[in-house]
Every structure is written in structure tokens, then in C-alpha cells.
Amino acid sequence: MSDDWSADLQGLIAGLAPHLYELRRRLFIILIALTVGVVIGFVFAEPILNVLAQPVGGLQNLQAIELTESVGVYVRVAVMVGGILAMPIIVYELVAFVVPGLLPHEKRMLFIALPFIFLSFIVGAAFAYFVMLPVA
């Protein structure tokens, strides 16, 4: 009986290992994309902060209350820019990992939903910049 259980476990591990290796590879690509995006975000953090601060009167009107707050703002902007820049790669890698396991009607629904998800992201970002940021 224990030989059957051991054989089943070995079969499960052998069947699962390629999927775990593929997941590991895709997560590594996502990590590289995020790293490159954050580096680009650090390079362009000041111009992006200038654009983000325009609705409140520019960077000169912003105040740093804590000692490290101004550095923290640059880091947050760089990470946000990195996430935004890496998002297409992240979505592609996640979809490419999941799609082989989906049924045809599930694939169709996923590919129909993706443009609406992207549009919702753009509308939300525009709402935050044009409506919420000036009030804050």
C-alpha cells in the first residue's frame, strides 16, 4: 500500500514540476521587468513629480513633515512608475501562464475582458489626476 502512495506522490511531483519551473521562469521575468521599470522611474522621478504636483501649485508648495519624507516620495514615485511600466509584461506573463489551463469559453471571456480592464485602469488614473489630486 505504501508503494502505491509513494508512486502516486512521485507521479504528482513529476507532473507538477514543469509547471512550477515555468511559474518560476515567468516570475523571474516579472521581477526583471519591475526592476527595470523602477530604475527608469528613478531616472524620471523629478519630472514626473513636477507633473504630479502641478494641480497643487508645483513642488515648491509641497511640504515635507518628516525628515525622510522627500526621499520616500521619490521612492514611491519610482516604484509606482516601475509597476505601471512593467504592467503589460506582468499581465502577459500571468495570462500566458494561465491560458493553457483554461477552457475555450474561459479563454474567450478572458480576452474580451482584458481591454476593459486596461480601459478601467486608464479611467481610474485620469480620475485620480484630474478630480482627486486637485482637491487633495
Image (cartoon, rainbow, N blue to C red):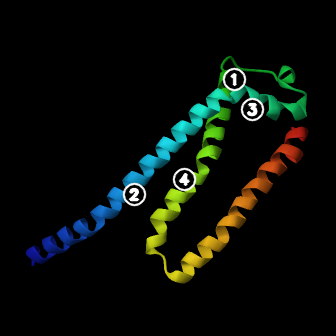
Local secondary structure at mark 2: helix
Q: Which residue is mark 4?
A: 90
Which of the numbered marks, if any, corresponds to residue 48?
3
Marks 2,1: beta carbons within 8 A: no
Which of the numbered marks, if any, corresponds to residue 23?
2
Q: Earlier in the sequence, mark 1 or mark 4?
A: 1
Q: Assign the N terminus to one quadrant of the image.
A: bottom left
The picture quadrant where one finds residue 114 is bottom right
Q: Earlier in the sequence, mark 2 or mark 1?
A: 2
Q: CA distance from mark 3 to mark 4?
A: 22 Å
Asked if residue 57 is positioned above or below residue 118 in the image, the reply reads above
The amino acid type of the residue labelled 2 equals Leu
Tell which tag, 2 or 1, sits nearer the viewer.
2
Q: Which residue is mark 1?
A: 69
Q: Earlier in the sequence, mark 3 or mark 4?
A: 3
Percent position of residue 93, x then y = 50, 57
The amino acid type of the residue labelled 1 equals Glu
Q: Assign the C terminus to one quadrant of the image.
A: top right
Q: CA distance from mark 1 to mark 4?
A: 29 Å
Percent position of residue 74, x then y = 67, 27
Residue 19 as seen in the image, left or right of residue 90? left
Name the residue located 80 percent from the left edge and 28 percent from the top edge. 50
Residue 72 as seen in the image, left or right of residue 14? right
Asked if residue 57 is positioned above or below residue 2 in the image, the reply reads above
Percent position of residue 83, x then y = 61, 44
Name the residue located 91 percent from the left edge and 28 percent from the top edge. 57
Comparing 23 with 88, the one in front is 88
Local secondary structure at mark 1: helix
